[in-house]
Image (spheres, grey):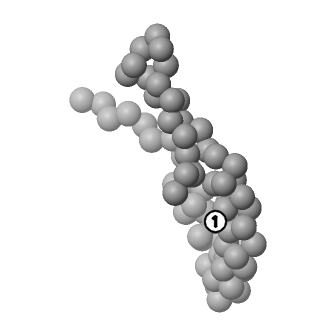
Amino acid sequence: MGLATRERTTEDRRVIFVAITDKALRLLAELVEPIMELHRRVAAKLSPAELKEVIRLLEKGRQPIAPEVE
């Protein structure tokens, strides 16, 4: 689809640089409004308490994961 490019370094062939293409950036820009509208429609069905709980859970999910201690 041409949404990303890959390039190996000459110093270490194990290293691969990945970059987003202009085509992918345009696609993302086209998706912003439809996704925002979907979020608005979903949020409109929630009570203020439910919305607050969703926000709390999403924020919790963004927290770093502590390494497991053996």
The quadrant of the image that shows the C terminus is top left
Q: Does residue 69 sit above or below 45 in this rendering?
A: above
Q: Quadrant of residue 55?
A: bottom right
Left or right of residue 7, residue 55 in this image: right
Residue behind mark 1: 55
Q: Residue at x 66, y 54 (%)?
A: 23
Q: Does residue 63 sit above or below 53 in this rendering?
A: above
Number of labelled discs?
1
Left or right of residue 50, residue 1 in this image: left
Q: Is residue 49 in sight in this rendering?
A: no
Q: Residue furthest top?
A: 11
Please tell me which residue lies in front, 24 or 31: 24
Q: Secondary structure at mark 1?
A: helix
Q: Does residue 32 sit above or below 13 in this rendering?
A: below
Q: Amino acid at mark 1?
A: Ile
**Which class describes the residues within 10 Å of circle 1: few (<14), some (14-19), or many (20+)?**
few
> Picture coordinates of residue 24 (x, y %)?
63, 54
> Picture coordinates of residue 3 (x, y %)?
57, 51
Q: Residue at x 67, y 62 (%)?
A: 27
Q: Does residue 10 sit above or below 23 in this rendering?
A: above
Please tell me which residue lies in front, 32 or 64: 32
Q: Residue at x 60, y 70 (%)?
A: 53
> Picture coordinates of residue 56 (x, y %)?
60, 62
Q: Is residue 34 in sight in this rendering?
A: yes
Q: Residue at x 30, y 31 (%)?
A: 69
